[in-house]
Amino acid sequence: MKWNHNGPYLFKVPTSLDRRKYLKKALGIREQFDVEDMVVALRCLKGDFGENQLPDNCQELVKSIVIHMASVPLERDFGPVMLPDTQFILHEAKKLYHNDIPWAPLDDDYCYVHHAVPLGAAVALGVQLCRTASLAKYSVDSEFMVMEFGQHEDLTKRIQNIIRDYPFDMTILKELLQNADDAKATKMHVILDMREHSKENLLSENWSELQGPALLVWNDSVFSDYDLVGIKRLGLGSKRSDSETIGQYGIGFNAVYHLTDCPSFLTGGNKLCILDPHMRYVQHGTVKHPGEMYTGLDEKFWKKFDGIQSAYLRDGLIKVPKELLGGTLFRFPLRHTMAHVTSSEIVKDLSGKVVDRVISAHRMCDLLEDWVPNMKQSLLFLNNVVELKFSVIRDRRGVLHLQNRYRTELDETACGRRVELAQKVKAYDDTTTGGEPFITTYPLTLVETVKKGKDVKEEWLIQQGIGDMENSVKTWSYVEQVKPRHGIAAPLRHKRTKNWTVKYFAFFHCR
């Protein structure tokens, strides 16, 4: 770089001497200044002017210095470097902030670096980014999403291998319904958000890729710290010793990766958790920590990153129940374009046509219209969830259109018997050899709300149990810690034709 300043601090030799190469060499005059010379000059300026604004000639000098520093690689640590704030008062670089969220109101707690300092040089010299600093205020768990699986299999490959074993069908929703039941939720609401959301004021530069159509799944439970530990361990449920649950947030949750590359969920209205296997969408994603959790979310957070408000139903939608602002809302941005599919390491090697992996909003709507009605009888054997709804948000007006609603009704006696079953299951699980087998029978009404709000009711007789009823002393020792559970449901008030249907389930719960 040609130096055009004749002081202060850094001086240019007169033109008459500039041609005398041997004289310059003898006097130790160099052809150009290096970065360390400039760092020293900035420190001298700070020493002379302290907390005062630099005079005009020094401002021009500082501008030239930072432009030069931006043009060369900064390959080593030069110690504390002084840079100007917006008033041209010098501060240590690490105490300054670059405003990379210009849409947000300026924060009085921040001292902003002067716009003359190029972004690359500012970051290299230690200036903090406002977006990173703002999110850091809400990020309290630096080890959220720790997923280590050994040295020979990366995370996206592991997920790919898991979803190969899970069909791309309503199993995805069934897993989420079972998870909600295990979390002791009483309601689950499936919402297809077909809108395109804002591409500005987001959590990261790449977040805009997630602002398209998404499948939302809400339930009225709130994640405990224990649940958070469970969901961040790929393939390991958080309640492996609790027979009331069936792998809560365990390996089955990963079926959602058929739809998305970046699941996230908002729980309790103030905690946002992001799973980012590609390490693409959160600010500090790493191989060891491919995700982030932000907690204590307040009005200031939502205003600063208001581009994501509508994506999490926090923008005052029409006819949206207030209950959706509490509980837990999962958001699964769809791979709705070919670009999403081709950039995904999770689905790129799956069998079948590549085009079949594109999940457009309209295709997702067709799938849900088939899946949800076929899930209504899943409510028969659940312990806690009594209502399942499916709605669609079609356009920017944000109207929530209810498509299906199913609920179960139990009388007081039936509720008591189901509570007793839960107690017996827990007691059975607490023994090492297996407790006393137990079986109970109770009536249940399955209600479907159809068009114009009319209810259609089906009466069912439910029988559920735990243990081997034929051999109560059997320990199932040939498979370690197996606990058998079973159930059957028969419709009442139906003619027993050749198409008469009985629903049943049986599973072996491993402690």
Image (spheres, rainbow, N blue to C red):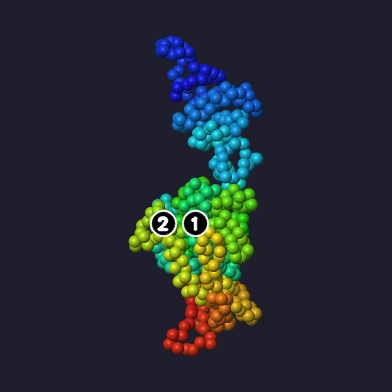
Taking the spot 52% from the left edge, 49% from the top edge, the residue there is 200
- The answer to whether one can see residue 106 in this image is yes
Asked which quadrant contains residue 321, the reply is bottom right
Q: Secondary structure at mark 2?
A: loop
- The answer to whether one can see residue 434 in this image is no
In the image shown, does 124 or 314 lie closer to the viewer?
A: 314
Residue 469: % across, % down: 52, 81
Q: Is residue 366 above or below residue 101?
A: below
In the image shown, does 429 or 257 lie closer to the viewer?
A: 257
Residue that mark 1 sits on: 196
Left or right: where 76 falls relative to 91: left
Question: Which amino acid is tagged 2?
Answer: Thr
How crowded pointer 2 is (Cα within 10 Å; few <14, some 14-19, many 20+) is rated as some
Taking the spot 63% from the left edge, 27% from the top edge, the residue there is 53
Instruction: Tell me the CA gap for discs 1 and 2.
Output: 13 Å
In the image shown, does 129 or 318 lie closer to the viewer?
A: 318
Residue 375: % across, % down: 49, 73
Of the two numbered discs 1 and 2 in the rendering, the one whose residue sits closer to the viewer: 1
Q: Which mark is residue 332?
A: none
In the image shown, does 307 or 229 lie closer to the viewer?
A: 307
Quarter of the figure that contains the N terminus: top left
Upstream in sequence: badge 1 or badge 2: 1
As drawn, the residue found furthest toward the front would be 397
Q: Is residue 49 above or below residue 349?
A: above
Question: Which amino acid is tagged 1?
Answer: Glu
Residue 123: % across, % down: 52, 37
Residue that mark 2 sits on: 337
Taking the spot 51% from the left edge, 23% from the top edge, the residue there is 37
Q: Secondary structure at mark 1?
A: loop
